[in-house]
Image (spheres, helix red, strand yellow):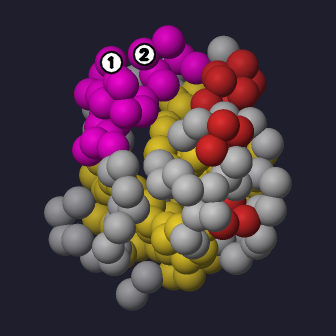
């Protein structure tokens, strides 16, 4: 049975292979432009910096150098139920320098399209066991991010040899470049 997390709550991830599913629905846009939300993964070391430039996994770099993190591809519309984008994680392959995996969703070209997360609803991140497909945990973002164009949904981090997930739910007015500047 899945554990539903609240912002700031942490939970162990005992499965060595799991999938991060991210989902959202968008309101009808008054800007006349379709929404394109993008999931990105920042694979960080102890100093909260990217392990390497290729440790930024997103729609233009689908697999981490160690093969432990794989983005399954960009969903340009977000239509339909369930996960809109997925990232597969295999902790048995993870580089020993990795101490954190940061899960971020940004709105592509948000400033030009005049879009923000206040126009997005039913956002969630869930983690399910890749072997059994059993949902381990789920975190539904309930805040109204009326000016934010990027949200850190959660982070997976290693503490005392165990991997845990923290429900972060922190918005940022900015995009992928702002996160790259933060983690490079």
Residue farthest to the left, as pictured: 131
Question: Residue 5, labelled with which disc?
Answer: none
Q: Quadrant of residue 176?
A: top right
- Name the residue nearer the viewer: 173 or 171: 173
- Name the residue nearer the viewer: 53 or 174: 174
Q: Nearer the viewer, mark 1 or mark 2?
A: 2
Q: Position of residue 139 (x, y in %)?
A: 57, 72
Up the image or down, 32 lies above or below 43; here it is below
Q: How many C-alpha atoms fall within 10 Å of the one at disc 1: few (<14), some, or many (≥20)?
A: some
Question: Which quarter of the figure is the N terminus placed in?
Answer: bottom left
Q: For residue 145: magenta? A: no
Q: Position of residue 89 (x, y in %)?
A: 33, 45
Residue 123 seen from this side: no
Query: Which residue position holds label 2?
Result: 54
Question: Residue 65, labelled with which disc?
Answer: 1
- The residue depicted at 72 percent of the width and 65 percent of the height is 118
Q: Position of residue 33 (x, y in %)?
A: 53, 52
Question: Which quarter of the figure is the C terminus placed in?
Answer: top right
Tell me, yes or no, whether the two marked residues, 1 and 2, touch with CB atoms within 8 Å.
Answer: yes
Q: Which residues are magenta?
A: 49-74
**Of the residues under marks 1 and 2, which one precedes in the sequence?**
2
Q: Main secondary structure of the magenta part?
A: loop
Q: For residue 53: magenta? A: yes
Q: Position of residue 79 (x, y in %)?
A: 35, 67
Q: CA distance from mark 1 to mark 2?
A: 6 Å
Image label count? 2
């Amino acid at each position: 049975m899945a554990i539903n997390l609240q912002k700031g709550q942490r939970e162990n991830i005992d499965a060595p292979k799991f999938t991060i599913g991210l989902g959202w629905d968008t309101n009808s846009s008054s800007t006349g432009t379709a929404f394109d939300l993008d999931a990105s993964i920042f694979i960080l070391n102890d100093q909260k910096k990217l392990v390497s430039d290729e440790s930024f996994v997103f729609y233009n770099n689908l697999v981490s150098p160690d093969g432990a993190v794989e983005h399954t591809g960009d969903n340009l519309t977000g239509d339909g139920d369930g996960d809109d984008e997925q990232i597969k994680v295999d902790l048995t392959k993870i580089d020993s320098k990795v101490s954190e995996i940061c899960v971020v969703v940004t709105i592509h070209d948000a400033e030009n399209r005049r879009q923000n997360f206040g126009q997005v609803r039913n956002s969630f991140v869930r983690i399910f066991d890749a072997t059994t497909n059993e949902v381990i945990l789920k975190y539904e973002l309930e805040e109204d991010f009326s000016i934010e164009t990027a949200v850190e949904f959660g982070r997976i981090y290693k503490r005392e040899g165990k991997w845990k997930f923290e429900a972060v739910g922190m918005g940022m007015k900015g995009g992928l470049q702002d996160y790259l500047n933060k983690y490079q």
